[in-house]
Image (spheres, helix red, strand yellow):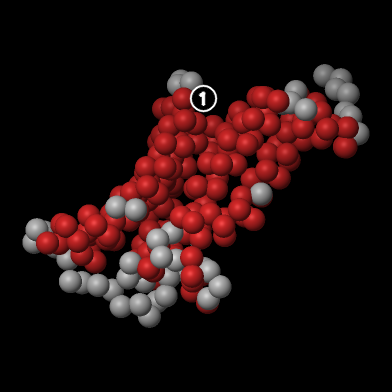
Amino acid sequence: MDLHHEPVLSGLARVARDGTFMTFIGLHLAALIVFTQFQVALPLDMNAHGEGSRAFSWLMAFNCAGVVVLQPWLAPRIQRFDRSNLLAISALLFGLGYGLNALVPGLASSLADLGLGTAGTWRLALYLAGAAFWTVGEVVGFPIASSLVADLGPIALRGRYQVRSRWSGAWRWPCLPCSADRGSTGSARRCSGPSASAPDSRSPRDTS
């Protein structure tokens, strides 16, 4: 097939004029900002509620194991569903997973008061439950987003569509510190300190 390849800048300009694609990129960027809070706001929030580096390590291991186990099994089974609906479900799972974190302190204390275990144990269990939501959202949404980018672009410009998608994804990083300041309970004052990137391993874990 004989394809006409445009100069780099004019090809990228055509990508930027694609309203459907740019709308998708904006929405995907918003979802990525929420999802990537596990690297910024989540450790701050866990640290603020007495969970140290060990608990955060369990969450990261849980996420990695979930992706490895679910991706080969789930991906073929969702191909028959509408991709727009799958992306919406993925975004909803991100919101549910991180939204659950706001309930962790109160729920953990309430369950401990009922004599069902310690508050520390319930905090970790609830953080893991939240991680289960956003892990499934990751498995569902990210492969679909990549395939949608490929399909939206003309054959001769698919590489530039993918590049523009990656550039947009990179913009989440400048947004993350501000969103972490607003999104993690009691952690904004820590953003200038040494514990901003990970939970403080010296923080005592509440087992009351």
- Residue 97 in the image: x percent, y percent? 38, 46
Residue sitting at x 46%, y 25%? 85
Q: Position of residue 107 (x, y in %)?
A: 22, 55
* Residue 56 visible from this viewpoint: no
Decide: few, some or many residues near mark 1? Use Cα within 10 Å; few <14, some 14-19, many ≥20.
few
Give left or right: position of 124 versus 22.
Answer: left
Q: Nearer the viewer, residue 3 or 58?
A: 58
Counting every numbered tag in the picture gives 1
The image shows residue 28 at horizontal and vertical percentages of 58, 37
Residue 91 drawn above or below residue 151? below
Q: Quadrant of the N terminus?
A: top right
Between residues 79 and 13, which one lies in front from this camera angle?
Answer: 13
The residue identified by callout 1 is: 84
Kindly state the secondary structure of the residue where label 1 is placed.
helix
- Quadrant assignment for the C terminus: bottom left
Horizontal placement of 36 versus 207: left or right?
A: right
Q: Judge by depth and name the residue closer to the eye, 157 or 43.
A: 43
Against 61, is 77 above or below?
A: above
* Residue farthest along the bottom direction in this orientation: 202
- Residue at the spot 78% in from the left edge and 28% down from the top edge: 17
Q: Position of residue 130 (x, y in %)?
A: 34, 49
Q: Residue at x 74, y 30 (%)?
A: 158
Q: Residue at x 41, y 65 (%)?
A: 186
- Residue 10 visible at all: yes
Q: Quadrant of residue 155?
A: top right
